[in-house]
Amino acid sequence: MVQKIYLVNPPKIISMLWKLAKLFLTKENLKLIEIIGNYEDLQKDLPAWFIPREYAGEFVNCIPPGDESGVSIRRKIVPKDHITPYQIYRRKGINRPEPRRKDIPAGTLFVESVVLPGNHTKLLWDFTCSTGVEFTIYDRKRKLLYPQLHLFTSSLPEEGILENLSPASEYFLEFRNLSGYFSCSVDYSICSAP
């Protein structure tokens, strides 16, 4: 939940737009947003340990991904910033299996069962779908191994790997079409590795 949003030294057009937006916001929402012209004013409202170092505070971000400022610093986007599909297979040195297609009717689910061969302990997968699906992976005891997520992957495949699994065990990948009206097409690849 947002407690307060501080805009520090924004462009002048933001200040003009803010004056216009004030006319449409409630008093509660107006209290949540504050535009500050310099760093010293920010230090009056917040403790130093909470303010990023770039804004004359003491905060250093230690949680990846991101830089130590915890602030998004503008930089030129380069090709290596773009996500490359099927990276997980390349990193593990595995050829991606031929994808399969399944049409899931509205409001139903599709479960793909995978039994790991005797010496395999890794499960790799990727998929794209035409609409949003709820996706999860679980074992025979219905213990979740991958959280139940609502995903939209029409352009870039959702891919992942589960490692240190029990060999010769069965795992289930579940795709649930949440749409009440439209069917969903899922193109998926699943494989295992030692």
Image (cartoon, rainbow, N blue to C red):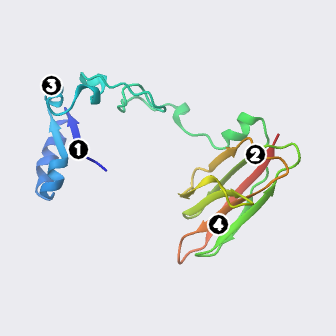
From the top left corner, tell me how far across and down residue 87 is, in percent: 67, 39
Residue at the disc numbered 4: 185
The amino acid sitting under disc 2 is Leu
The amino acid sitting under disc 4 is Ser
The amino acid sitting under disc 1 is Lys
State which mark lies toward you, 2 or 3: 2
From the top left corner, tell me how far across and down residue 65 is, in percent: 48, 33
Distance of label 4 from label 2 (alpha carbons): 29 Å
Above or below residue 154? Residue 117 is above
Residue 64 lies left or right of residue 29; in this view the side is right
Find residue 154 and name its label.
none
Q: Secondary structure at mark 4?
A: strand
Q: Residue at x 59, y 63 (%)?
A: 130
Distance of label 2 from label 3 (alpha carbons): 53 Å
Residue at the disc numbered 1: 4
Earlier along the polypeptide chain: callout 1 or callout 3? 1
Q: Quadrant of residue 55?
A: top left
Q: Rate crowding at label 3 as few (under 14), some (14 to 19) or many (20 or more) other CA atoms within 10 Å.
A: few
Find residue 40 and name its label.
3
Earlier along the polypeptide chain: callout 1 or callout 2? 1
Above or below residue 175? Residue 145 is above
Above or below residue 189? Residue 92 is above
